[in-house]
Amino acid sequence: MKRPTDLAREHGISTQAVRNYEQDGFLPPAERTPSGYRIYTELHAAALRAFLALIPAFGHALSGQIMRAAHQNALDELLTTIDRGHAQLLRDRGTLDSVRKAVNHLTAAAEPDLPATTRNIGELAHQLSVTRATLRNWEAAGILAPQREKGTGYRVYRAGDVRDAELAHLLRRGGYPLEHIATVVQQIRTAGGTDSLARALDDWQRKLNAQGLAMLKAATLLSAYLELAGAGPGA
């Protein structure tokens, strides 16, 4: 038997945080003493270790979904959520690689050897999995500068614009504010300098690696919890 303080002390969190995690479904329900005090066990301790390890790997919301699915022995839902997280990390790595390869081509919006690929706002939004409003916000911040079709006034995103949008998307996922991204893009456009971009990409690479390692740690602790709970294919 464990008290809330026992679980809280292991991770340096408050006892109220432990109670909140249980209330939110991130820990299995605790039994109560006749006087109403919660009774925690090693099962709850293992669940808390798994949940806190999942957060740097998948974020708070997805970590909560994973733990609730674990408590319900909804293995398919649990694994699907984890797979989505791995797929997003893989996509981020691919985008990072693409941006690195495109750095030398970001110095001008229209180089002669660039393919004449264009997108409208809906197509570009779909490509990046963002909303049209997001692209408009990036334009207002000075990150994107699409041309306009004569007559209709519709935005036209050419190859250079698409690359700038990919760069903005990557840096936003890295937590950079729009003002910083606009500065980086402007420097690339006007001066051809890549120092700011290189530092940002190196920083994002470190974040991706840290997330990947966090996924490995979280998988170990989640597996230990599932085994202790008797969840899984044979349960």
Image (cartoon, helix red, strand yellow):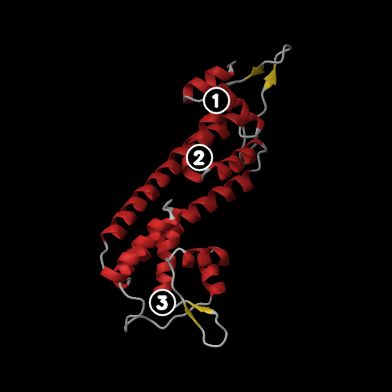
Q: Amino acid under label 2? A: Ile
Q: In what quadrant of the picture does the N terminus appear?
A: top right
Q: Nearer the viewer, residue 205 or 200?
A: 200
Which of the marked residues, 1 or 3, is nearer the chain's N terminus? 1
Please report whichever mark, 2 or 3, sits nearer to the chain's N-terminal start: 2
The label number, if any, that marks residue 55 in the structure image: 2
Where's residue 59, x and y in %? Answer: 52, 44
Measure the C-alpha gap from mark 1 to mark 3.
52 Å
Q: Residue at x 45, y 63 (%)?
A: 141
Residue indicated by mark 1: 45
The secondary element bearing badge 1 is classed as: helix
Q: Is residue 5 left or right of residue 209?
A: right
Residue at far bottom of view: 151
Up-down relation of residue 178 to residue 144 (above or below): above
Q: Is residue 210 left or right of residue 132?
A: left
What residue do we see at 42% from left, 73% from top?
161
Give 227 or 74, whichever is nearer the viewer: 74
Kindly report which numbered mark, 2 or 3, lies closer to the viewer in this rendering. 3
The residue positioned farthest toward the right in the image shown: 34
Q: Which residue is mark 3?
A: 159
